[in-house]
Image (cartoon, rainbow, N blue to C red):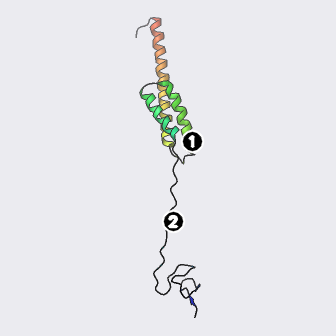
Amino acid sequence: MAKFCINCGKELGDTDKVCSQCGTPVDGAAPAQATTVVAPARAQKSNGLALAGFIVSLVSTILCCGSFNVISLILSIVGAVKAKDCGGNGKGLAIAGIIISAIGLILLIVLTIFGYAAAIIEEAGYSY
């Protein structure tokens, strides 16, 4: 007499302990162990340009090295564009680098204008 699976109805062999179709145990046999396959974690690409732009902008603003603010601004902008390719990695650092270097450039421009104004006033003989 043929046996059939109580779950899916597939015909079972005489020596089957589990159904080959659905894995249901036959006649009190231990249930088949389920295996979980875990996909390997994908390595995130690092965004070195964003990090470099942030560090250079921070250092150049603190040390008042205005010419490096231009370099940090360029690095940060390229890092922000590259963040899309890196899965968003480094986007925050790139934006922070853009903001810090922009503030540094504005400070450099303002201080330069005040310096020239003070030199012109002193050269004209006015006292302040």
State the residue position of label 1.
82
Question: Around disc 1, counting alpha carbons within 10 Å, would you say few (fewer than 14), some (14 to 19), or many (20 or more)?
Answer: many
Q: Residue at x 50, y 24 (%)?
A: 67
Query: In x, y percent, where is residue 114?
Result: 46, 17
Query: In x, y percent, where is residue 69?
Result: 50, 28
> In the image, 19: left or right of 58?
right
In the displayed structure, 60 sits above or below 19; it is above
Q: Which residue is drawn at 53% across and 84% down?
A: 16
Front residue of 109 and 87: 87
| Amino acid type, label 2 | Val
Front residue of 127 and 14: 14
**Secondary structure type for disc 1:** helix
Task: Please identify, in this view, whether the residue under mark 2 or under mark 1 is nearer the observer.
Answer: 2
Q: Which residue is drawn at 51% across and 44% down?
A: 46
| Amino acid type, label 1 | Lys
Residue 122 appears in which quarter of the rendering?
top left
In the displayed orientation, state which residue is furthest to the bottom: 1
Alpha-carbon span between mark 2 and mark 1: 32 Å
In the displayed structure, 69 sits above or below 124; it is below
In the displayed orientation, state which residue is furthest to the left: 128
Q: Quadrant of the N terminus?
A: bottom right
| Mark sitting earlier along the chain (2/1) | 2
Query: In x, y percent, where is residue 95?
Result: 50, 39
**Secondary structure type for disc 2:** loop
State the residue position of label 2.
37
Q: Quadrant of the C terminus?
A: top left
Query: In x, y percent, where is residue 92?
Result: 48, 42
